Amino acid sequence: MPEKNVGLNKTYWDNFYKSNFKNTPSQFCVCVLTELDPLAVVVELGSGNGRDSLFFASQGHITVAMDLSHQAIANCKRDAKARKVNHTSFFQGDLSKLADVEKTIKHARKKSSGKEIMFYSRFVMHSLDDQQEIDFLQNLSSTLQTGELIYFEFRSAEDAGLDKHFGGHFRRYVKVDEFKKRLAQGGFNIEYEIIGQGMAKYKEEDPFVARIIARKS
């Protein structure tokens, strides 16, 4: 039976974000930024401490982000104001609930005024249990429009046996082939994929991660 993400680790993440801050963007964020249309709107689903959302916004992109943790969202709003980063919106919500995802994306579409929207989800999939992943991908299938892209980065199955800098919370190491099948079932075509190390290094940790870019058909 697949392991369950009991309680969504909500308490863990609220406590985590009370004391863990990082202003520099992830390697993935910087990589994705080089591909974006200068006017594209960014929707980050599972924004954590906002390091990537705030960086996208600091580079001129209207950015809309959502995270489960109330503490994380409060921090993001505070940091955006302190750093004078404009055109950002942060929402608390559950990725496995269609209404929460719809609310966030509806706000982004209103903000976009018809401009391209790009979707981004980094280090989220491995924090969801199997059913939550299924629900999240179904929600994406229901809300993304034909031609829209989503960029994923997550810990793959190859990372299971490696040491972690941050422990103590739920991780489900994603089987990439199964993930791709679920994307296909939801009407997504894979445009790019890679699995390896050297792409998400943090201090002494060099995890195995997968990067996938998928387009809604």
Image: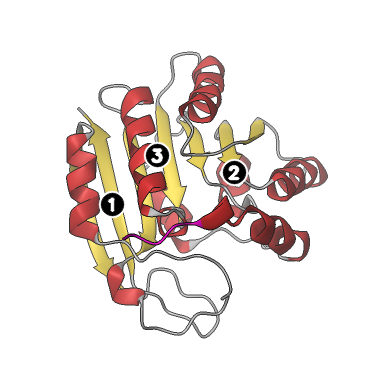
Q: Residue at x 40, y 49 (%)?
A: 32
Q: CA distance from mark 1 to mark 3?
A: 16 Å
Residue 198: image location, x then y, percent: 37, 75
Looking at the rendered structure, the kind of residue marked 2 is Asp
Residue of label 1: 212
Residue of label 2: 67
Up the image or down, 35 lies above or below 87; here it is: below
Quarter holding the C terminus is top left
Label 1 Cα neighbours within 10 Å, binned few <14 / some 14-19 / many ≥20: some
Residue 3: image location, x then y, percent: 39, 62
Residue of label 3: 136
Rendered image quadrant of residue 195: bottom left
Q: Is residue 150 left or right of residue 45?
A: left
Q: Residue at x 80, y 44 (%)?
A: 78
Q: For the magenta stretch, what is the residue range?
A: 1-5
Nearest the eye: 128 or 194: 128
Residue 157: image location, x then y, percent: 29, 70
Up the image or down, 199 lies above or below 10; here it is: below
Q: Residue at x 71, y 59 (%)?
A: 17
Q: Is 211 within the magenta? A: no
Q: Secondary structure at mark 1?
A: strand
Can I make out residue 34 in this image?
no
Please name which of the two marks, 3 or 2, marks the residue nearer to the observer.
3
Q: Is residue 90 left or right of residue 25?
A: right
Q: Earlier in the sequence, mark 1 or mark 2?
A: 2
